[in-house]
């Protein structure tokens, strides 16, 4: 995604149509980032919209260095920084709601291979959503966004060792959850076959 410079200049001049055009262009990319960090739809959309406001507010900074940094990388950084800032602000909430009940969900037995892959991906995303918030955030930053433990520690104001512990816990919980879900399906499908 590389918007035309003319579109970015119109956004800088506070052209609402240009804002809408840029928002439409960036929506899916920004949503995919927010999807990894937030469980519910309202939080995802709130983060996406607030990150977009920051993008518009700082568009001039990008225009000054657009030859050095790709637009996609720049908006990704702004979005992740916004999410991390929100994460820090909600520390009290996070500490009080560290453990959540796992949501029960039923999946149809897939007979068609692409649907099976889609169902597995949905299960993996659901498993990530069900991780405690700190574990999920560290997992996403390390595994999906490629940050090192030292960088995560600086962003979340924790030690690098604490970051490693959260990653280890996240991986363990994901493995346990997915093994349980997939063994449940195997038993169900074996029962259906007989």
Image (spheres, rainbow, N blue to C red):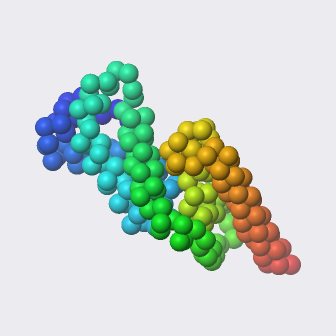
Relative to 78, 159 lies left or right: right
Viewer can see residue 81: yes
Residue 104 image offset from top left, x and y in percent? 63, 77
Residue 183 image offset from top left, x and y in percent? 80, 69
Vertical position of residue 93 compared to residue 140: above or below: below
The quadrant of the rendering that contains the N terminus is: top left
Q: Residue at x 38, y 21 (%)?
A: 68
Vertical position of residue 51 compared to residue 186: above or below: above
Residue 133 image offset from top left, x and y in percent? 56, 61
Residue 190 image offset from top left, x and y in percent? 83, 73
Residue 21 placement: quadrant: top left
Q: Nearer the viewer, residue 101 or 7?
A: 101
Relative to 34, 99 lies left or right: right
Residue 125 placement: quadrant: bottom right
Residue 188 placement: quadrant: bottom right
Relative to 50, 10 lies left or right: left
Viewer can see residue 29: no
Q: Nearer the viewer, residue 80 or 105?
A: 80
All told, the count of numbered labels is 0
Q: Residue at x 15, y 47 (%)?
A: 16
The quadrant of the rendering that contains the C terminus is: bottom right
Q: Residue at x 30, y 34 (%)?
A: 3
Report the residue that reaches farthest toward the top: 67
Vertical position of residue 152 compared to residue 4: above or below: below
Q: Residue at x 38, y 56 (%)?
A: 47
């Amino acid at each position: 995604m590389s918007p035309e410079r003319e579109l970015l200049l119109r956004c800088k001049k506070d052209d609402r149509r240009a804002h809408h055009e840029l928002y439409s262009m960036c929506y899916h990319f920004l949503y995919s980032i927010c999807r990894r960090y937030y469980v519910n739809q309202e939080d995802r959309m709130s983060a996406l919209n607030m990150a977009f406001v920051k993008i518009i507010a700082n568009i001039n900074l990008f225009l000054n260095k657009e030859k050095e940094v790709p637009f996609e990388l720049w908006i990704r950084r702004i979005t992740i920084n916004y999410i991390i800032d929100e994460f820090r602000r909600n520390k009290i909430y996070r500490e009080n709601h560290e453990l959540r009940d796992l949501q029960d969900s039923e999946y149809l037995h897939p007979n068609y291979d692409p649907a099976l892959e889609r169902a597995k991906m949905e299960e993996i995303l659901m498993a990530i959503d069900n991780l405690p918030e700190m574990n999920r955030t560290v997992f996403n930053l390390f595994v999906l966004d490629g940050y090192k433990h030292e960088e995560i520690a600086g962003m979340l104001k924790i030690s690098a060792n604490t970051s490693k512990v959260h990653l280890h816990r996240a991986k363990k919980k994901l493995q346990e959850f997915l093994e349980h879900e997939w063994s449940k399906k195997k038993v169900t499908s074996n029962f259906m076959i007989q």
